[in-house]
Image: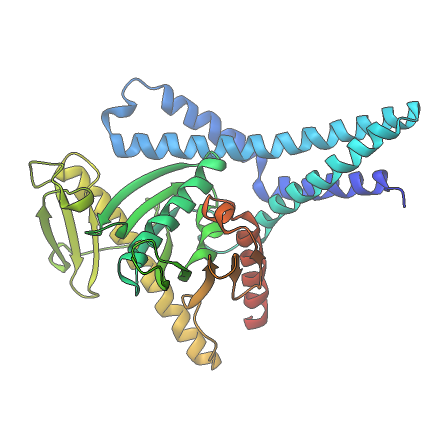
Amino acid sequence: MATDFDSAIKQLQATMTTVEKVLDVPAMKAEIASLGEQVAAPDLWDDQANAQRVTGRLSGLQGELERFTGLRSRIDDLDILVELAREEGDADTLAEADAELVRLQKSVEQLEVRTLLSGEYDAREALITIRSGAGGVDAADFAEMLMRMYLRWAERNHYSVEVFDTSYAEEAGLKSATFAVHAPYAYGTLSVEAGTHRLVRISPFDNQGRRQTSFAAVEVVPVLEQTDEVDIPEEDVRVDVYRSSGPGGQSVNTTDSAVRLTHIPTGTVVSCQNEKSQLQNKASAMVILKAKLLALKKAEEKAHLDELRGDVQASWGDQMRNYVLNPYQLVKDLRTSQESGNPQAVLDGDIDDFLEAGIRWRRGADKANA
């Protein structure tokens, strides 16, 4: 059956018009121009934290705009290609157009998912914390694998990443890590990754070659903006300083520049050791603490609403994805049933299909609970 190019291209163009309204492309272009002027200012790097925020935001917005305009341009090119192929009766070119149509439909569908991100904080940048769980050294290694997965995903999308803290395990891997993804809608997109991830494989750390199951927890919260109201009295925070350390506990700093903040009322603990000065680390740690306290407040409000609704469903943060490397190869999301038979590609950052399925699943769950 011949492809109905006219109908398919018309549908793609209509979808892109909807996406353009949701993205608010004119506002995006205006913000890019404003941020470009800030980046050009000679005193930009006098405030390094603000400079990283500005350059990260600019890079993320430019990537989003290029993705949108690139897709629109490819749709226009496809329309022209089909017209020329028809005029010349060129079957090979029509086959090439058919393949490009399939690729475009997939890309536009992924971009369309953005229209589902309408939560209060979905447009924000994301702050991600990964912690190793049960499973000993395998769990610490798994936590590092997950961090690499998200960093590779960000790299694929040309998103800027800022690592705040990495706590290395003694033998291998990470006890925990905290990093920010500076991109529009990073929180709305990555929030579906929150929960417990499970790895099954032959342990490279077991000299008897036994299969090992290990766990790691992923927490995702939105990065706060200056307009957010999170007031933390000074007496509610305990500040501890210590020396930064690298893999195996090797000292990489001869001064007590690393900072750990403990919010006494809630017991929330955050740390930052990746900046050179104690002052910078304290400022970054406070950004993380405020973001986590805001997320905690929202979680408490949601729990109260769920209680009023009589909601007895498992929470979003429960086990949500399995990565099985042995005795077979499969990554499967337990909420959406999205799966991949290529775990290595997934661990290399190919997680867009899982993100899309998670966003659609969450939208459906939100509608069911409305």
Q: Is residue 4 above or below residue 269?
A: above
Taking depth in this image into account, of 251 and 203 the one nearest to the observer is 203
| Left-right relation of 20 to 39 | right
Taking depth in this image into account, of 249 and 40 the one nearest to the observer is 249
| Left-right relation of 345 to 266 | right
Residue at (38%, 54%) from the top-left corner?
Answer: 220
- Outermost residue toward the front in this view: 208
**Position of the C terminus by quadrant:** bottom right
| Rendered location of residue 352, percent (x, y) | 54, 47
- The answer, for residue 218, to whether it is visible in the render is yes
Q: Is residue 296 above or below residue 57?
A: below
Taking depth in this image into account, of 225 and 180 the one nearest to the observer is 180
- The answer, for residue 122, to whether it is visible in the render is no
Number of callouts: 0
| Rendered location of residue 63, percent (x, y) | 51, 32
| Rendered location of residue 340, percent (x, y) | 56, 54
Q: Is residue 47 above or below residue 235?
A: above
Q: Is residue 55 above or below residue 216?
A: above
Residue at (35%, 54%) from the top-left corner?
Answer: 142
| Left-right relation of 108 to 278 | right
